[in-house]
Image: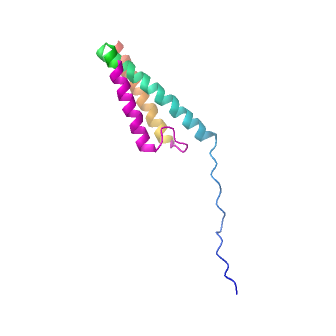
Amino acid sequence: MTLNPMQPAHPAKSATPGRATDVKTFATAVLLTFGVGVLMMDGWALLESGFGAFLGLVAGGFGVFWWRQIHGKVFPRELSTKSVVILTVINVALVLLLLLQVS
């Protein structure tokens, strides 16, 4: 008498990342870089000096560090669409803030 181990009903499918994950990762890289740059320009416009740009750069560094703490990596392979949309909204708000400061 032999003992046959139970087999799963459906074999596990390998989760291969597709184009959607690549696009989200690329969009995250672009949005984080753009956001730090706009944050530097916001600091420059607010304080009207290079020190404001430096403070914007420091704030951007903390923002990237916070992003890494939430997602485990700066550019995670599996990223939710919600995170990319929130990052886009933050960037739009930073650009609007810059436009309000300039005018």
Q: Tell me what residue is drawn at x 64 percent, y 43 percent.
A: 18
> Where the C terminus falls, by quadrant?
top left
Q: Nearer the viewer, residue 73 or 26?
A: 73
> Where the N terminus falls, by quadrant?
bottom right
Position of 67 with respect to 19 (left or right) is: left
Position of 30 with respect to 17 (left or right) is: left
Say above or below: 87 vs 94.
below
Q: Position of residue 20 (x, y in %)?
A: 60, 40
The residue most toward the bottom is 1
Magenta stretch, overall SS: helix
Q: Tell me what residue is drawn at x 43 percent, y 31 percent.
A: 89
Say above or below: 82 vs 46.
below
Q: Position of residue 49 (x, y in %)?
A: 32, 13
Q: Which residues are magenta?
A: 53-80
Position of 103 with respect to 79 (left or right) is: left
Q: Would you say residue 3 sits in the magenta stretch? A: no
Q: Quadrant of residue 70?
A: top left
Q: Tell me what residue is drawn at x 51 percent, y 38 percent.
A: 75
The color scheme shown is rainbow
Q: Tell me what residue is drawn at x 42 percent, y 38 percent.
A: 67
Q: Nearer the viewer, residue 30 or 9?
A: 30
Q: Position of residue 15 (x, y in %)?
A: 62, 51
The residue most toward the right is 1
